[in-house]
Image (cartoon, rainbow, N blue to C red):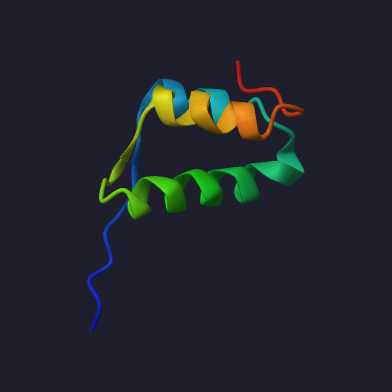
Amino acid sequence: MAETKQITWDPEADRRIKRSPFLMRRFIRKRIEERVAGRGRTHVTEADVDESASMYRQYRFK
């Protein structure tokens, strides 16, 4: 059975995601978590949100 790791969020990164449109939050959060997990990490930082903000430019993160 594959080991599943819980992804944790930096409080400031989480706050910034909550400023994105309600209907897009789940999608954006999932994409960021997938990118972080793909890099072998388990914690999302503001830098990860910044990186994603350039990809999802039309949504507010700041």
Query: Residue 48: which quarter of the image?
Result: top left
Give the residue furthest to the top.
Answer: 62
Relative image position of residue 43 (x, y in whole percent): 30, 39
Relative image position of residue 35 (x, y in whole percent): 44, 48
Q: Quadrant of the C terminus?
A: top right
1 shown above or below 13? below
Q: Quadrant of the N terminus?
A: bottom left
Nearer to me, 26 or 33: 33
Query: Residue 28: which quarter of the image?
Result: top right
20 shown above or below 29? above
Tell me which residue sits at (62%, 49%) in the image. 26
Nearer to me, 32 or 13: 32
Looking at the image, residue 48 sits to the left or right of residue 19; the answer is left
14 shown above or below 39? above
Give the residue furthest to the bottom.
Answer: 1
Tell me which residue sits at (68%, 30%) in the image. 20
